[in-house]
Image (cartoon, grey):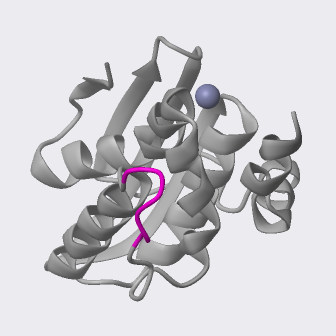
Amino acid sequence: MDDLRDLYQEAILDHNKRPRNFHPLEGANRTVEGFNPLCGDRLTVHLRVDDGVVSDASFEGTGCAISKASASMMTESVKGQRVEAVERLADAFHRMVTTPPGAVPETGTLGKLAAFSGVREFPVRVKCATLAWHALRAALATTGAKVTTE
Ligand code: ZN
């Protein structure tokens, strides 16, 4: 299990232990539930979107350390950003965690989200890391939809 030590970086452990923006969101106008049947992660992402800006974001639910830490860091990263910037960030995150093992992932625009680059070595964990991001994308695209990542 030595490899897992690389996966569970300090930032991920910290966000799992003390998830940020982990609460219902008053004034939310987008709410999407995401479910990852492979792991049993079930997270709900709340957004408030005003004039093309994600003015607030939060999440609730239960999941493994990776899924919770990813949702926690995601909500921190997207708050106050324009929707187009959030979509670019979601693309960059997805590219990073699906970079084949052995290739160098691009983490330039991701800041501390780069902590999840080790996830790509563990295909089952990729679904955990991207769950909140799939819900985020769905929340930007529609209202109240239910998302399942499979
Ligand atoms: Zn999980």
Query: From what the image shows, is residue 81 above or below residue 70?
Result: below
Query: From what the image shows, is residue 117 above or below residue 131?
Result: below
Q: Which residue is drawn at 54% across and 23% down?
A: 42
Q: Which quadrant does the C terminus fall into?
A: top left
Residue 25 in view, yes or no: no
Q: Where is residue 27 in the image (x, y as percent from the top left)?
A: 40, 58
Magenta region includes residue 104: yes
Q: Position of residue 52 (x, y in %)?
A: 15, 77
Residue 12 occupies quadrant: bottom right
Magenta region includes residue 76: no
Q: Which of 101 and 114 is in front in this view?
A: 101
Residue 84 appears left or right of 44: left
Q: Residue at x 50, y 63 (%)?
A: 74
Q: Which of 135 and 122 is in front in this view?
A: 122
Q: Residue at x 27, y 24 (%)?
A: 146
Residue 125 occupies quadrant: top right
Which residues fall within the magenta stretch?
Answer: 100-105
Q: Position of residue 5 (x, y in %)?
A: 85, 50
Total numbered badges shown on the rendered structure: 0
Work out which residue is located at the far front of the displayed protein and give it. 102
Q: Nearer the viewer, residue 58 or 124?
A: 124
Query: From what the image shows, is residue 32 above or below residue 46?
Result: above
Residue 28 appears left or right of 17: left
Query: From what the image shows, is residue 4 above or below residue 35?
Result: below
Q: Nearer the viewer, residue 74 or 10?
A: 10
